[in-house]
Image (cartoon, rainbow, N blue to C red):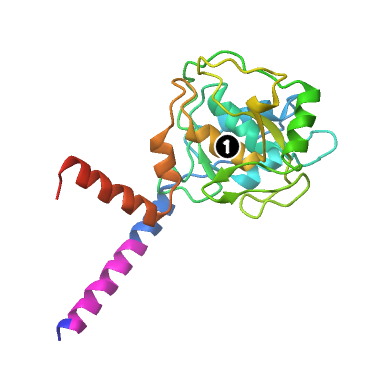
Amino acid sequence: MCWKKYCVDGQRRIKLVARMRREQELEKMYGAIKGPYSQASIKKRIEAFFLDNIGKVVTREQIIEVAKAPKTGMEPENWHQRLSELRTDDGYTILSWRNRKELKISEYLMPTPEKRATVSKRAKIDPATWQEVLKRAGYRCEWKEGNFVCGLRDGDVDPVGGGTVKLTPDHKRPHATAIPIDPRNPNDWQSLCGRHQVMKKNYWDDKSGWLNVYAIVQAASEQEKRRVYEFLKRYFGDK
């Protein structure tokens, strides 16, 4: 009888969670492409789209559609990076599934048009130095997590984020730190794909130059979150 009771209770919990998720989906308001968006740059077109949909959920597919070249209809390869720049360079708050449980992967939300204070202009790599970095990297993305190396090449299809990979130069340390970034020193730079450009920017606090531990934990798996949770309970002496 006890086991039967536990099974019934478990099924009730599953149904309750499913119902709560359905209610959350119903509460979400989805944005729409109002356009036309004929701004000169990809970033400006994406910015205008978000400003047309303040407080509403927009999707990856909508962003790609808006970011396409107005005259040719060509799909951009680096929309991830432009989206990240709206956060870090322009100071917009753009939330994703890492920040809000009700958002699915590839859903985004700009809750307010207000901008945060931003840091100084970014350094740009010297073209010859960029070629040195690419040669060192084997013309691949150099993102590393433990023993894992991304290794995606220009033109590959990103198996996680989708779209065509475009490698871009990234300074290894946040530009907000006091450490100067030399446009001609390849050791100051790395080659990253668009998805890992976004992840790296999320992992570093651009204002302080310190690791953004909160964002790292948000991006972690459920199992890793539980390990962090248990560690913090032990650290603070909580039971």
**Disc 1 residue type (three-letter):** Val
User: In the image, residue 149 lies at what x, y percent?
Assistant: 61, 48
Q: Look at the image and tell me whether residue 33 can be seen.
A: no
Task: Name the residue nearer the viewer: 159 or 178.
Answer: 178
User: In the image, residue 9 lies at what x, y percent?
Assistant: 22, 73
Which image quarter is the N terminus in?
Answer: bottom left
Q: Is residue 150 magenta?
A: no
Q: Quadrant of residue 216?
A: top left
Q: Quadrant of residue 211?
A: top left
For disc 1, the marked residue is 198
Above or below residue 128? Residue 22 is: below
Above or below residue 161? Residue 166 is: above
Q: Which residues are magenta?
A: 3-18
Residue at the extreme right of the image, as rendered: 72
Q: Is residue 218 left or right of residue 183?
A: left
User: In the image, residue 138 lies at what x, y percent?
Assistant: 75, 43
Residue at 21 percent of width and 46 percent of height: 233
Q: Is residue 15 magenta?
A: yes
User: In the image, residue 182 lies at what x, y percent?
Assistant: 66, 17
Residue at 67 percent of width and 25 percent of height: 44
Above or below residue 36? Residue 155 is: below
Above or below residue 15? Residue 162 is: above
Task: Name the residue nearer the viewer: 154 or 164.
Answer: 154
Magenta residues, dominant SS class: helix
Residue at 56 percent of width and 13 percent of height: 120
Tag 1, which secondary structure?
helix
Q: Is residue 197 left or right of residue 207?
A: right
Q: Look at the image and tell me whether residue 36 can be seen.
A: yes
Q: Is residue 1 left or right of residue 222?
A: left
